[in-house]
Structure formats: structure tokens, C-alpha cells
Image (cartoon, rainbow, N blue to C red):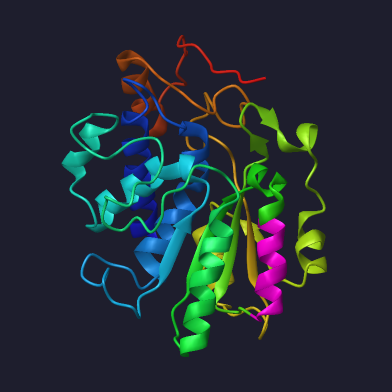
Amino acid sequence: MSDLKDIAFKVRQHIIRMSTDGGCFVGASLSATDLIVYLYAEYLNINKDNLEDPNRDYLFLSKGHDVPALYGTFAEIGLMDPERLKNHLSTSDNIYWHPNTKIDGIEFHSGSLGHLPSVALGVALDIKMRGGKNKVICILGDGELNEGSCWEAVLVAGAHKLDNLIFVVDRNQFQANMATEDLIPLEPLHDKFTAFGAAVKRIDGHDFDALRGAFNAYPFEEGKLNVVIADTVRGKGLPSIEARADRWFCNFNSEEVESLLKELAGEEVTQLTSETLVVR
């Protein structure tokens, strides 16, 4: 447990460092950090030595703007040289705002929300037809669930009894710079997935014991799509931006970054001066 917490702390440090000189989607990346760390560091059969193995597991990051958490996790588990993270948004590398398959370990490009549930579904169906034992996970944003293609994928997964597929919702309650329930309400989310034929677990997405308990119960029910709703906090770990609608994409200056790294370690809350990004 302490190892996972240590890894998650270091991943959050990486995210903060990537949030300057062009910025990144800090809030959503911090909300998904513990989930992504748990899956790669403990749960999934994915490592630098088996990326070409057809029997390994698969993870698709459909909410591609969370990729700083993925990059940071790759750096901490040996899938990426940590020094490469300094190339974020540099023309000399492929590390930018959304996943790029030129980076080892990235399964599929994402960023246009609602696409990857169907891609993951196709991979899971292929595995099922071949009699494989691989697990397939697709991480979605809660705001992403406004895309009808997500619910089509849930229906098709149920029709094909894909109990080797897990949809994970990072339920941080925000979509861009609005609360999901103020834009297009999602609740009761558990009941919606159940009505679509899925087996659902809802947990604290920052609690490693809760994550372990949920995923170790896989498959949740024979013949049903598995869905984990992970309740999270946007900006988790930084009180200065936690649960703030306006701090979803951040381009901090160097002084703010240094202060935020200290804040992450429990020191004084940062007084932010950089501009916020508003899309509505």
C-alpha cells in the first residue's frame, strides 16, 4: 500500500511539472492518478517486456486529456524514461496533450471523447472469440458519458456477454469548466449502467483498498460488462485547485509550479496568479 501511495505522489509531482510552458489538463489528471497507478503498478499484466505479447492485458485511456497521469505512471513503473517528461510539448518528442501510439505502451490515440469504449469493446470481443484470458480496461470521463457512443458500447458489450471488459468512470463531477450535474445531469449513474445490463461497483477512486476490493472481484457477474464508477476529486492533492471548475486546464508559471510541489507535500496552499481557461 505504501508503495502505491509513494508512486502516486511521484506521479502527481510529474503532472505538476508538466503543467507549465504550455500547460496540461491538471485537474482531471490528478483525479485519475490513483486509479491509473493502481491498475499499472499492481493489477494489470502490462510491463515493458510484454507489450508485444497477445496474452497481456490492455488499457485504453478514452479520456485522453488525462495522459499526464499516464506518462507519469509510465515513468515510475519503467515503461518510459523519466527524463523524457521534460520534453512535454516539445517538437523533439511525442509527449503532448493526448495519447500518441508512437510512445510504447499507448494503445490508441484518444482525445475525441466517446470513441475508445467501442475500440476496447472490439479488442475484448476478439479475445473472447479466441478463448483468451486477457483483461481489457477502458477509462472514461464522467462528462464523456454525454456521448451516445459510450452507451451504444455498453449495449453491445452486454449483447456479446463481454465479462472480460471493464469500463471505469473517473467520476470527478466536472466536465471542462462546469459541473456535470449543472450541464447534463448523469445521476443516478449506477442505476443507468445497471439498466443497460452491466454489473456495477461504485467506490472511492482514491482509496487503494477500495480499488483492490473492486477489481479483485472481476468478473463481477458472469456474462456482463463490468463497470467501476470511481468517485474522485478533481485536482486531488492540491487544495488550491481541488474541485474547482476553473482549474481544469492549467498553464502555471515556474514560481507556481515550485509552490504547488511544496503544497503537494503538505506545505502552504499556493496563491495562484496564472489565468484560467473558460470555454463557455
Question: Does the image show residue 176?
Answer: yes
Residue 41: give x, y in percent of width and height.
35, 63
Quarter of the image holding residue 21? Answer: top left
Question: Does the image show residue 201?
Answer: no
Residue 105: give x, y in percent of width and height.
31, 58
Identified at 47% across, 39% down, the residue is: 65
Majority secondary structure in the magenta region: helix
Relative to 6, say whether 223 is above or below: below
Give the residues drawn in magenta, as a range.
150-161
Identified at 35% across, 55% down, the residue is: 106
Residue 131: give x, y in percent of width and height.
47, 90
Quarter of the image holding residue 90? Answer: top left
Residue 38: give x, y in percent of width and height.
43, 60
Q: Nearer the viewer, residue 242 or 222?
A: 222
Q: Nearer the viewer, residue 38 or 88?
A: 88
Q: Nearer the viewer, residue 107 or 172?
A: 107
Q: Does the stretch in magenta take in 106?
A: no
Identified at 79% across, 32% down, the residue is: 182
Q: Is residue 93 left or right of residue 153?
A: left
